Image (tube, coloured by chain):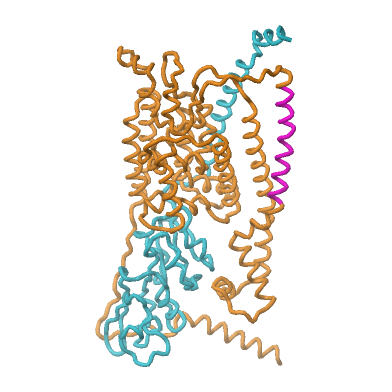
Amino acid sequence: MEQKIENMNENKNSPIARRKFLRVLGTAVAGGSVLAISGGLFSKAKGSEVSHYWQIDPQKCTQCGRCETDCVLQVSAVKCIHANKVCGYCDLCGGYYRSNVKELNTAAENLMCPTGAIQRKFVEDPYFEYTIDESLCNGCGKCVKGCSSFGNGSLYLQIKRDLCKDCNECAIATVCPSDAITRVSLDKPYKLKDE
Amino acid sequence: MMNKIVLICLFLLQIGQGVAQNRFPKPDFESGYKYPEIHYAVANENLLVTIDILLLVALMGIVAWAVIRKRTRKPIIWVSVISVAYFGFFRHGCVCSIGSIQNISLALVDSTYVLPFSVLLFFILPILFAFLFGRVFCAGVCPFGALQELIHIKSYTLPRTLSIILGMIPWIYLIFALLYAITRTSFIVCHFDPFVGFFRLGGDIGMILFGAVLLVLALFVGRPFCRYICPYGALLSLFSSVSIWKIRLTDKSCINCELCHNACPVDAIRAPYINKVNESRQRGVKRLLNYFVLLPLMILCGAFLMRLISNELSRSHKDVRLYEMVVQHEANPGEALSVELDAFYGQGGDIKELAVKAEKIQADFNFYATIAGILIGLVIGITLIELSVKRTRKLYEIDHAACIACARCFSYCPQYKIGNESGNKPL
């Protein structure tokens, strides 16, 4: 028996030689797979000029309010955007006032926006211009809901590219009930309503 | 007659919907009011992405040079600082190599998925470097590793049993990450990212707490995230174990002083071991063969169990959950609509279409979860087999799969110092 073991050690099939062989084989397999994966994927990969960025489709958005709460940022990168060219410039604005308010004045209890981000400016009788103060907007979408139910739908939510962290997977997209958040290509960086 | 009324009603409804977007006409301004011009900022992402890739290659190159050629640790500390500052705090850690696993796997199965070139490079370059020089990416180029590297004070060794059990987690995590990515359920690696909250100075409080626990652990245990969680590290260890250029402590002979072993924070240096079990070779081979018979059993077990729970798993997919909600709602329609159902019915929800979708996802889960089960069985089986293979080691040896190229050991090696002082530079 002992002799046999000795024989084995002297043999070129000794465990040491075999381990070495396996290691070389492993290296070859690893190198081959690196080449195969990169080769296979390079044909699939698109250049960075068609990189995609997260945007909301305003037509699909249901203003559920998750954009405010589910963004990875403390204050959401989703902001309300106002399409002036769609707006009716109404005095009684569904996005500005809450429904069933007693008096139409700018007291906070009458206003839809919880942070006072919507500013209103008199243009001419009977038209008012509405603008969004982006630094105050938290993307809750309350005004959007009001505007789309009682108005032209000129207020809408959109992900601001300069604020968005461009997460690998958008945290809001994973909870969006209407799958409104998808990636769009760089040549059309914003999904806007007034274009 | 009834039919006609219904038709007219439907027609009127459609008109109503069409008008809904323009209830109020465009105002005719008489005061010469002009619509404000609004431009939205679009950052030049291409430039930053190019810098990312160049820096990635440069930093990995520096680490490779430091550990293979110079055998010194100082550059690695600087690389770590740069990585934490740039990839971490400046770029907020997205997209990272760890997360890119999911994009790559999704691109492999789904041809409609657009894989950006930069993501591919983030995935393949560290693997290429691991294949050439070992895990130089882990050393300090990865911002997560760098963060743990910089705060590490003292290395306490975990019990071997615990370390081996925890060591299986990255593999299982990797398998689940692939399963969830391929089925388009979610990117769990990104979702359960413990450190990104620090880099962004805010985020999910649960994950930040988890990250804080890991960081406190990292003070006393080397790289808890890299060793026991990171799925990309597991992938890299495959390539680094067969890498072309390997890290060597010294060109002179080892004197078995144990210093490098004590210095290693990740237990990557194996102590000499004398195999006292006097087993005849044939018996050993037989034992190993038995294990290889056992391995398919474990694989079958894993596949069976995962298939069993695949329907449960598929419920983490949004569409399957929605389908269940719809079915429940159809059963008792009186209940108030949830946000999801509201959106579904608001878009004119087609239940049949949703059912087909949900069934397809469940079928996908059935198939891919079975494969995942096979892989899990394989991971556990191979770990057990590895445990039972006891080889005699005469000297301290580096385990290249576990070595994260932090270069702590070099300065501890007395042989290396002698070589340096007498002017014999290594290599």
Considering the image in quadrants, where does the C terminus of chain A appear? bottom left
Q: Can residue A42 be seen in this view?
A: no
Considering the image in quadrants, where does the N terminus of chain A appear? top right
Q: Which residue is drawn at 63% across and 17% down?
A: A15
Residue B300 is a magenta residue: yes
Q: Which residue is drawn at 53% across and 84% down?
A: B16
Residue B145: x %, y % from top left: 42, 40
Residue B138 is a magenta residue: no
Q: Which of B325 and B394 is in front in this view?
A: B394
Above or below: residue A66 compared with residue B24 = above
Q: Residue at x 47, y 82 (%)?
A: A149
Chain that the image shows in cyan: A
Chain that the image shows in orange: B
The magenta span reads B285-307
Q: Nearer the viewer, residue A23 or B278?
A: B278
Residue positioned most to the left: B31
Q: Residue A185 appears in which quarter of the rendering? A: bottom left
Above or below: residue A31 compared with residue A101 = above
Number of numbered markers: 0
Q: Nearer the viewer, residue B152 or B317?
A: B152
Q: Residue A83 appears in which quarter of the rendering? A: bottom left
